[in-house]
Image (cartoon, rainbow, N blue to C red):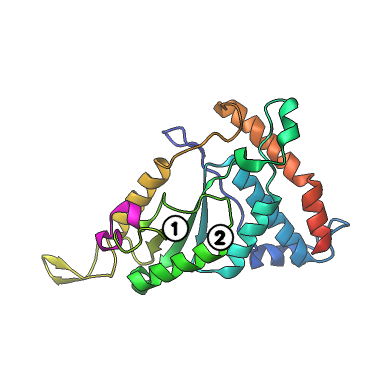
Amino acid sequence: MVTSERILLLDTQPLLSASVLDQLIRHEKSLPPEITTAENCVELQSLQLAAFMFTVCHVVLIVQDWSEDINMLQFILRAEMLKPPTPSPTIESTSSSADDNDDFYPQLVFVHNKANPEDFKLDNIQQANEVINVLLKHSKLKYKGCISLTNSKLLPHMNKQLPDTDVNLFLIPKGDVSKDAKCVTPLMPEYKGHPDIQMIIKAFRNLIFSAPRAQLAHTSLTEKNWFHYAARTWDGVKKSNLMSEYGRLL
């Protein structure tokens, strides 16, 4: 999908999804020779999708119905490990490929969908920040200081409470988005424990669209060039020797 602002939006099937596994088993699709079980096939497919997204997207959203999923954080680290390097602009520069300081890494944003009012409490947000910080402290993915409730200014009391540990964590509350909210009085709507959902979604959208964007490759890419770059990247991910070797080790 391409927005009116010429921003490309990509989506994937659910990662590590039980429904995908069920469909794979139900239709009895033949597995690749190096994959022993359907569970391993689903994990490898999910790793391929994640590694692809980490390579061709400026901002990657990890959307879950809950937060602090340690299994997902460990999966992200595996996908980062299997991510293909940024292509070198010239053949001569490949000699320094061991130094990945120039590799592209996207902004990683954790989106807690269907959040409860308790999830918006400062203690719970601090706990989520600490878990993500501990598990991703050695990651080169850009997971801090860009897109969060603190940056949105929707919860001003958090600005001074999370100065150093503010990860890219955004909460979207669950509930009815209709305008028929219960009111204590005609002039005082019921307190829900968080700002209005429409305000949250608008702030989230603005932060996503205004996020800093580094160059995906060592040369500038037009939309057409990006499409070809993405196609080559996906082909490379599927044919990756490192990915195949990891699949055999599962």
Q: From mark 2 to mark 1, how far is it between C-alphas?
A: 10 Å
Frontmost residue, 155 versus 226: 155
Q: Are marks 2 and 1 in contact (CB under 8 Å)?
A: yes
Q: Position of residue 213 (x, y in %)?
A: 48, 38
Q: Is residue 212 above or below residue 167?
A: above
Magenta stretch encompasses residue 208 = no
Residue designated by label 1: 167
The residue carrying pointer 2 sits among few (fewer than 14), some (14 to 19) or many (20 or more) residues within 10 Å by Cα, namely some
Q: How many marks?
A: 2
Element on which disc 1 rests: loop
Residue 67 visible in this rendered orientation of the protein: no
Q: Is residue 210 above or below residue 167?
A: above
User: Label 2 sits on what residue type?
Assistant: Leu
**Magenta-tinted stretch:** 150-159
Q: Is residue 84 above or below residue 90?
A: below
In the rendered structure, the answer to whether residue 36 lies left or right of residue 55 reads: right
Give the position of the C terminus as an image quadrant: bottom right
Magenta stretch encompasses residue 153 = yes
Magenta segment's dominant SS is helix
Residue 95 image label: none
Q: Position of residue 210 (x, y in %)?
A: 39, 40
Element on which disc 2 rests: loop
Instruction: Name the image quarter holding residue 37.
Output: bottom right
Name the N-terminal-most of marks 2 and 1: 2
Residue designated by label 2: 136
Name which residue lies at 46% across and 59% down. 111
Q: Is residue 93 above or below residue 72?
A: above
User: Label 1 sits on what residue type?
Assistant: Val
In the rendered structure, the answer to whether residue 225 lies left or right of residue 27 reads: left
Frontmost residue, 24 versus 221: 221
Instruction: Name the image quarter holding residue 69.
Output: bottom right
In the rendered structure, the answer to whether residue 101 lies left or right of residue 61 reads: right
